[in-house]
Amino acid sequence: MENKVQMGFAAVNKTLESKIPSSKEGEGRGKHYVIWGDNDDFPNFLYQSYLDCPIVSTIINGTADFICGNSVKPNIVGFEYPNRLGESWEDLFSKLAIDYLIFGVAYIQVIRNNAGNIAEFYHLDARYVRSDDFNQMFWYSKDFGKKWSRSNKALIYPKFIKDSDLASSIICIKTPQSRGVYGTPIWGSAIKSVMTEIGIDSFHLNELDNNFSASAILNFNNGQPSEEQVDEIEKNVEEKFTGAENAGRFLLSFNNGKDNATTVERLSSDDFDKRYDALAKKVQQQIFTAFGANPNLFGIPTENNGFSNEQYEESFRLYNRTRVKPIAKRLIDAFDKALGQMGSIIIEPFTLVDNNNEDNNIQ
């Protein structure tokens, strides 16, 4: 009979848990509003991704600049400024555009005076706004997603209605592709690519901090451990050596002689730089594709550096037609409906040359 050797294997990190929270909407226990994602924390995840991914922040900030154009001016008497804070219309539109691009939804707070006339407009941070099923009532609190937020009282506002005397109300502006209570971000299809891009940056940073990285099998040559010991070894190795945050860490092994020494077998080559460069190019392309944008429009050169002014202008015309103008129009429409006047806000289209100062001197 053939002799068989019994071998024991322990898989480190047997399951890969995604760091991407669900965007699922649902009724929170004991809450009157609809929660947004796991632990009601999906908007915070979107905002943090925007902060952590340079490509996303560059596209969103640049697109917001395109939307605001060379200037944003009111075309209605009595609204030189949108509110008593002294914000300019460019300030207000930029905040609304950035929220619309990050979250797929933006909120305008409308304030009426004692006579019932509209007096002010404010931006409400979409991270802190929740809604009922039909966007008729809105809750505002900076504590959504926190475990102890149940004890905090959120501010409650009704939906804006033109012919009413509501002292304070909310206008909700969502992306056309939104189908739920909350918005669907334009870049929603690229969220995994965004997280991959963030992970690559984290890996390289920690690789520099920790000198080198190893992808290997660790052989512990001290006999077959018990199930409890295997679980403990798995836990310790996983916590200390796996994941992008632990790139480049090294292993110390203490043994009872050479015969029982821990051995390490390499599973892959050390060409992480080439592998990650290829991956980075792929995910960057997917992010730009989700936005429908050309990298050159945002100062990010492609491999083909021969990008002429004509090509730039052609790319900008396409992006302006498919992204910039539709978003600007949705924002302007919201103010038109509130103020009861078409063309209540006028945006001077974006140009590379300052029309008011063609020599581009700063004065």
Image: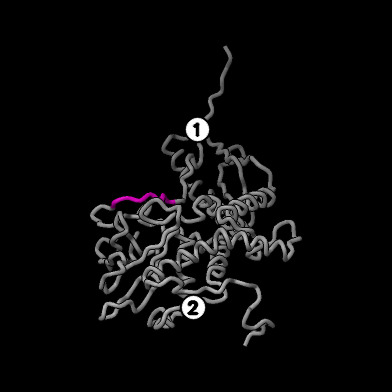
Q: Nearer the viewer, residue 310 or 246?
A: 310
Between the residue at mark 1 and the residue at mark 2, the CA separation in whole angstroms equals 75 Å
Q: Secondary structure at mark 1?
A: loop
Query: How is the structure coloured here?
Result: one colour
Would residue 318 be found to the left or right of residue 222 on screen?
Answer: right
Q: Nearer the viewer, residue 10 or 141?
A: 141
Would residue 161 be found to the left or right of residue 211 on screen?
Answer: left
Q: Nearer the viewer, residue 122 or 34?
A: 122
Confirm whether the magenta stretch covers residue 56: no
Q: Secondary structure at mark 2?
A: strand
Amino acid type, label 2: Lys
Return the x and y of residue 131 as percentages of the image width and height.
32, 59
Q: Around disc 2, counting alpha carbons within 10 Å, would you say few (fewer than 14), some (14 to 19), or many (20 or more)?
A: some
Return the x and y of residue 288 as percentages of the image width and height.
59, 55
Confirm whether the magenta stretch covers residue 23: yes
Return the x and y of residue 282 as percentages of the image width and height.
63, 50
Which quadrant of the view contains residue 231?
Answer: top left
Image: magenta residue range = 21-27
Q: Residue at x 41, y 70 (%)?
A: 336
Which quadrant of the view contains residue 335?
Answer: bottom left
Can the viewer see residue 14 in this picture?
yes
Q: Are marks 1 and 2 in contact (CB under 8 Å)?
A: no
Q: Which residue is mark 1?
A: 224
Q: Which residue is mark 2?
A: 73
Q: Residue at x 61, y 54 (%)?
A: 284
The mark lying in front, picked from 1 and 2, is 2
Q: Which mark is residue 176?
A: none
Amino acid type, label 1: Gln
Please tell me which of labels 1 and 2 falls first in the chain.
Answer: 2
Quarter that holds the N terminus: top right
